[in-house]
Image: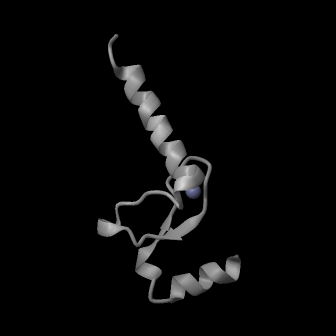
Amino acid sequence: MARQAVELLSGPDAPLLKECGAPGCTRVYIDRSRGMRRHWCGMDPCGNRVKAAAYRGRRRGTPS
Ligand SMILES: [Zn+2]
């Protein structure tokens, strides 16, 4: 795992290397999404968790 990270850091994909933005997750990933707008290592579980949190946040802020 560590060696893989080092190889990524020195490889051609280094500029695409990002750290996951999900709370509690420290995984790094290669962002090959269009526009490099991804913010997490993967959809499961991080992407789903972030989206669920955003959804809950929106609901909480909406007046009933
Ligand atoms: Zn993650």
Above or below — where is 48 with respect to 37?
above
- Residue 2 point in image, percent of width and height: 69, 77
Q: Residue at x 43, y 29 (%)?
A: 57
Ligand 1 visible in quadrant: bottom right
**Where is residue 45 shown, x and y percent of the image?**
59, 50
Expressed as whole percent of the image width and height from the top left, the position of residue 40 reads 49, 57
Seen as rendered, the residue at the extreme left is 35
Q: Quadrant of the C terminus?
A: top left
Seen as rendered, the residue at the extreme top is: 64
Q: Judge left or right: residue 48 versus residue 62.
A: right
**Residue at 31% of width from left, 68% of height from top?**
34
Question: Depth check: 11 or 55 in front?
Answer: 55
Residue 14 at what x, y percent from top left? 46, 81
**Residue at the spot 43% in from the left edge and 33% down from the top edge:** 55
Residue 20, placed above or below residue 55: below
Image mark count: 0
Q: Quadrant of residue 31?
A: bottom left
* Quadrant in which the N terminus appears: bottom right
Coloration of the structure image: one colour
Q: Quadrant of residue 7?
A: bottom right
